[in-house]
Image (cartoon, rainbow, N blue to C red):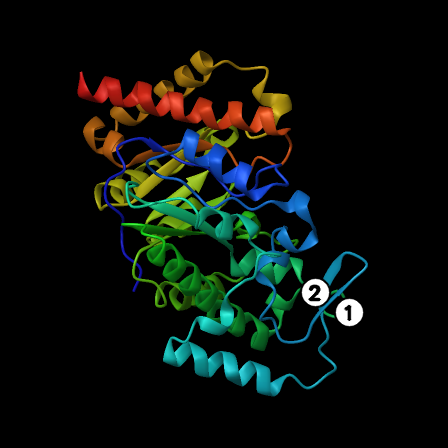
């Protein structure tokens, strides 16, 4: 069962995508910015299969990719493939749920770098809500609304997460963190594109049951943060640059979450280069310190410092390579500033 992670003490790491097409360069840039907590970036500019959802779709029964779109063929008989996923889930057999270089090229590039001096290594898997809302059937109905597929997704993606965790362990990672990329959690409570909370809970429990290390969640939109924290993720990653005010409306639950060992990854550095260039490292540090000051009135500031991380707001898709390095380095600089303050 997934567990909490050691207190990160305002360490910095990244989120999801980078604009690179060369995985070796991407890994070197990640390790230069985040030597303590590196992450496995995804590189969607290399091709369709490295994009969100596509990169975790290999084991999906009935998968069809045509004209750059992914959907499922529900007319065919996929009973055998579905039953195999259930059998593998019961047995914890993650080997068939791995991904080749065409899906996660940076994972294979990162294998050329020693990770034994890191404190933790992070990767990301498409969350079942986002997967289930983006993938549709022939009638353009999200497969999350199909009871069979909704139940299957938590198990399939749980096995994918288990495979990633095992890969990171084999690379020398002392601690692991698998983060579910879940922008569609913004649909919780929506009357337009509703997401059933019970389904989300069941899918989360399926995935958590497959892991030994940390399981986190990233949502770059506003959502029902009480519900998300009640899932007890090891790390809750959010776009704090845009949504900190809304998140802090849940301050009572946030305090309890952090006091009980949960970590908030504050995405205080804009991942969009067009927004980032309007800020400075100093102005972004001031933004984070303002959040810290607000939280210090609600909780022991030492707990806040120990249970916080610093990240970009989301994956750095809308930047060039030089801009992505600047964004990552800004997060790293804020982290160093915080740690100097904590150690003073």
**Secondary element at image label 2:** loop
Q: CA distance from mark 2 to mark 1?
A: 7 Å
Q: Where does residue 230 sit, x and y in percent of width and height?
A: 35, 53
**Secondary element at image label 1:** loop
Q: Is residue 290 above or below residue 141?
A: above
Q: Where does residue 126 sit, x and y in percent of width and height?
A: 53, 55
What residue is disc 1 on?
Answer: 139
Q: Is residue 149 above or below residue 256?
A: below
Is 114 or 3 nearer to us in this picture? Answer: 114
Is 110 or 223 nearer to us in this picture? Answer: 110
What label sits on residue 210 in the rendered view?
A: none
Give me the residue at 49% from left, 51% from top. 107
Is 101 or 255 nearer to us in this picture? Answer: 101
Give me the residue at 22% from left, 46% from top. 260
Which quadrant does the N terminus fall into? bottom left
Q: Where does residue 75 sit, x and y in percent of width and height?
A: 74, 81
What residue is disc 2 on?
Answer: 136
Q: Residue furthest front?
A: 112
Give me the residue at 42% from left, 29% from top. 33
Q: Residue furthest right?
A: 67
From the viewer's perspective, tell me whether residue 84 is left or right of residue 178: right
Is 169 or 263 nearer to us in this picture? Answer: 169
Which quadrant does the C terminus fall into? top left
Counting other residues with Cα less than 10 Å from the Cα at mark 1, is it few (<14), some (14-19), or many (20 or more)?
few
Q: Where does residue 168 sit, x and y in percent of width and height?
A: 38, 55
């Amino acid at each position: 069962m997934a567990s909490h992670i050691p207190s990160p003490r305002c360490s910095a790491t990244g989120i999801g995508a980078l604009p690179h097409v060369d995985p070796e360069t991407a890994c070197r840039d990640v390790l230069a910015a985040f030597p303590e907590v590196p992450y496995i970036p995804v590189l969607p500019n290399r091709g369709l299969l490295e994009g969100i959802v596509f990169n975790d779709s290999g084991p999906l029964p009935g998968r069809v990719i045509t004209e750059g779109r992914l959907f499922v063929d529900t007319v065919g008989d996929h009973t055998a493939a579905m039953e195999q996923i259930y059998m593998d889930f019961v047995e914890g057999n993650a080997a068939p749920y791995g991904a080749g270089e065409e899906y996660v090229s940076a994972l294979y590039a990162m294998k050329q770098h020693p990770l034994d001096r890191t404190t933790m290594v992070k990767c990301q898997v498409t969350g079942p809500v986002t997967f289930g809302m983006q993938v549709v059937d022939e009638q353009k109905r999200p497969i999350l609304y199909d009871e069979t597929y909704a139940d299957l997704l938590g198990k399939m993606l749980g096995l994918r997460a288990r495979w990633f965790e095992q890969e990171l362990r084999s690379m020398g990672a002392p601690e692991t963190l698998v983060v579910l990329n879940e922008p569609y959690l913004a649909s919780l409570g929506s009357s337009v594109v509703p997401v059933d909370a019970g389904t989300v809970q069941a899918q989360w429990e399926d995935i958590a049951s497959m892991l030994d290390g940390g399981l986190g969640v990233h949502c770059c939109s506003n959502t029902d943060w009480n519900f998300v924290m009640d899932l007890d993720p090891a790390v809750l990653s959010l776009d704090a640059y845009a949504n900190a005010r809304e998140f802090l409306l849940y301050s009572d639950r946030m305090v309890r979450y952090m006091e009980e060992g949960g970590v908030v990854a504050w995405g205080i550095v804009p991942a969009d280069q067009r927004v980032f260039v309007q800020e400075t490292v100093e102005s972004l540090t001031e933004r984070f310190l303002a959040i810290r000051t607000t939280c210090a009135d609600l909780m022991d500031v030492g707990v806040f410092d120990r249970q916080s991380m610093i990240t970009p707001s989301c994956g750095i898709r809308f930047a060039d390579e030089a801009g992505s390095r600047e964004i990552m380095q800004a997060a790293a600089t804020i982290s160093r500033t915080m740690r100097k303050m904590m150690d003073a």
